[in-house]
Amino acid sequence: MGDWKTVTVPVLPSDGKNIFQYTSERRISSPGMNSQVLRLPLPSSKSMHTFFSAFCTEENIEQSLSYLDRELTTLGFPSIFAEPRGRELNLISVINCMNELLVLQHKNLRAQEEVEMQHLKLGSDMDHLQNCYAKLKEQLELSKREIVGLQERDRQLQTKNRNLHQLLKNEKDEVQKLQNIISSRATQYNHDMKRKEREYNKLKERLHQLVMNKKDKKIAMEVLNYVGRADGKRGAWRTDKTEARNEEEMYKVLLSDFEQRQKQLLVENAELKKVLQQMKKEIISLLPPQKQKPKERSEDGPVLSDLEEDIGELNKENMWELSCETVREQLTNSIRKQWRMLKNHVEKLDNQVSRVHSGALNDKDVISREDHELETEKLELEIQQCKEMIKTQQQLLQQQLMSPCDDDTTLLLQDCYLLEEKERLQEEWRLFREQKKNFEKERRSFTEAAIRLGLERKAFEEDRGAWLKQQFLSMSTDYKHSESVTTPSAFLGSPDQDNRLAKSASRQRKPHCLSSPLSAESWQQTPQSITNNSAASTPPARDSKPNQWEESEGEETE
Amino acid sequence: MNFSELFKLTGLLSRFSPNGKCLASCVQYRLVVRDVSTLQVLQLYTCLDQIQHIEWSSDSLFILCAMYKRGIVQVWSLEQPDWHCKIDEGSAGLVASCWSPDGRHILNTTEFHLRITVWSLCTKSVSYIKYPKACQQGIAFTKDGRYMAVAERRDCKDFVSIFVCSDWQLLRHFDTETQDLFGIEWAPNGCVLAVWDTCLEYKILLYSLDGRLLSTYRAYEWSLGIKSIAWSPSSQFLAIGSYDEKVRILNHVTWKKITEFEHPTTIANTKTIVYKEVEKSPSAETERLSLPPSRASASSWFSTQSKYDISQVPVSLHHIKPVADRANPKIGVGMLAFSADNCFLATKNDNIPNAVWIWDIQKLKLFVVLEQLSAIQSFQWDPRQPRLALCTGNSKVYLWSPAGCVSVQVPMEGDFQIVSLSWHSSGDSMALLSKDNFCVCYLEREEV
């Protein structure tokens, strides 16, 4: 605590400065407090002194203290006395009060600062606004003057316009008037003309009468002799019949003219219809078959079916060349539809192309067009070549068909087309016969082989049988005899079976294998050998064998 | 091209016979009949007075010579030169005379158009047609010669009568809605009759053979109207030339205008070919100078050669401004002709008197303009091919065909100013007529 001077301080906001001063005094002595306060300007010491001494002197310390206490308590601060009515100062409360007062002072100073800033701002804003206001006022004046000027001009133009309209109306009226004058004069002239004409006619009649009355012998024709008619016929009297005939002739002439015209129109119509149909087909072919948007598909659907119907109908109808209105309408409507679709399609393509040119790097379209063109050229060349070929071939064919020739050559020529074929056929026949022969040979050899096989087998079996017989005979006598009798039959059956099998096999194999020329001889030989062999084995079977062989021979040859 | 020598002629009366074998010409009161190929005189007839009009009969056996002043018509026979026939109208007077299509009747129009007398050469009968109209084309025969249409006027109203030429029976008689009928013309197919009104009223009416009104066409009111008309050879088109310098083409199906051809003084369309006749300087002939100068070379000195140059479009044509307060002003399309193959139409606009306009009918566009150095006197299409011959009052004849055009100087001594020309029916030769002379020009097949 340093020395502090007491001064009567009125609690007014304007004196905040003074409080400021006091606090600054104190602060210098105790530097541990708010640095903010240190920045504040120092008041002159003289005024401070006066203030400090004005409030509290040595005489009125108690009074000033009580006054301070009263003031502080009214402000809401705690009392500075230790006791409510005591005389001793509560130092702590005094310090606290002082602190509070300092804080308050700071707040007030800050507030003041802010207020002053705002005040400055407002002042500058005000200035600015005033300037703007002045400028705007000027502008307003200017525009008002302009408006007035424009209004004036507008008024002038409107009057001009009205004048021109008036002039135009006047001119029109004049024109109308002149026309009326002309028409009235024309009627007047016509009337006058008619009057004069009537007079003239009267004169003519009079003159005519006079001329006729005179019976001028001069009005005559002198001719050496009358000439025959141009067409050589005799003149005829004029009767009703001739009148009727003339009428008829006239109508005939008119009718023939109408018919001719109608024919021409029909031809024209048919041609145009054809052209329209062609166009329709081409347009349909040009349009892409599938479309991405479902809307168009839905349009396509009924339209295509309509088209198909139309095409069918119109093709039929063109056959009979009907030309009723509904057909015409259908055709034209369908063409219009198709044309619209084609137009849309082309527009889309155009858009695509333009987009391509402007944006994306899609060169495919360009290249494909070039390719397309090249291809079309190639195709066209091909078409031309094909056409030429066809033409030449046609010519040759015609020549051949049309060329006149005598009988021999005709016969030759008639055969010439088939000659090749005939030769081919003959060759084939030859081959066929050769093959057949070979087949026969093969078959024979096979049968031979089969027979031989059969014979060998038979021989083998016979040997076996003989051997077994011997064995059996050696083992037993009666029992084996019956068996041995049966066995040859069984053996006979088997070689026969074998033969039959061989036959069937050879029959089957007949068409496939070639037969050698020697088979014929061997065929003849074998039955004899067979019969010889069969004769060697068992008698009853042998008898049947040749029969069987004969039968088989017959079968074979069949 | 070969030219014959000059022969005397009066009144531009030179006619080829319909069969193409003879050429008749008049000199004053004499009628000379020549062979076409050799121009040798076959017959010479003498008439009673100066001839004003000659006409061959359709079978080329007779020629009529009309002398209007005396009111006499004399008919001469080619087969029998001794045969003669004279028709005297006496005090009735004679204004016009023509053959009927069968070549055996003569129709004489008496003075003041009092009546038309039909004289027959086969019988003694005479017929009269009363109240004929006094107009330019009052009588019209169909191409096949079956019917004749006569314009009449009774009680200040116009009528048309259609007669059957074989027996002169009146077939139809009907009134026309015209103010003052100016002319009538049959279509080449003989089924439609065009009737048009005076130039004070633009109105053309089309009647069928049986007298029904098929259609009326009016282009505009009050201004001067129709000046000339022409049917196309196929009867498909009717070209109407009017005083407003336009040609309107009607089609035979609807009788409505299908197009309008304008004749402006400046041609701006680049697709039009403009042939301009320019004079060639005659300096090339100086080497052949010889003294004394022969007649031929002398004439060639005085006459300048000319040729055609193609002018660059836009071209401005020489035009005249007609006098405003005179009647029948020289303005409007006064000459119209279709070519024989129906492909071209040649027109002349009277206030651009030096130019012939050739229109392509297939494309309905202006094809060629021929600009000459002097006013065009007459032009005529070749009856066989699309070839146009025209003359402008000098001694040159000009030919145009789609292949090109050529200007041919007629190698004549003296002055030969061609005022009119007429083609032979075969298209191989042409008669060039001037006021006092005529010559025949033979064309080779490949020419132009």
Image (tube, coloured by chain):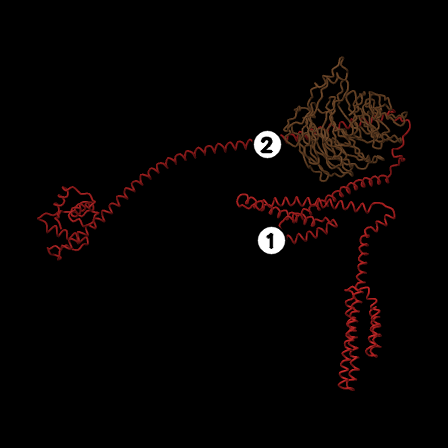
Chain colours: A red, B brown
Q: Which residue is mark 1?
A: A297
Do dots 1 and 2 share one subunit? yes
Q: Which mark is residue A173?
A: 2
Q: Residues within 10 Å of mark 2 (few under 14, many from 20)?
A: few
Q: Earlier in the sequence, mark 1 or mark 2?
A: 2
Q: Position of residue B109 (x, y in %)?
A: 81, 28
- State left or right for residue B318 relative to residue A364: right
Determine the secondary structure under disc 2: helix
Q: Position of residue A78 (x, y in %)?
A: 17, 55
Q: Position of residue A431 (x, y in %)?
A: 80, 59
Residue found at the very far left of the displayed protein: A59
| Letter of the chain that mark 1 sits on in the rendering | A
Identify residue type, mark 1.
Arg
Q: Nearer the viewer, residue B407 or A366?
A: A366
Identify residue type, mark 2.
Asp
Mark 1 to mark 2 CA distance (whole Å): 61 Å
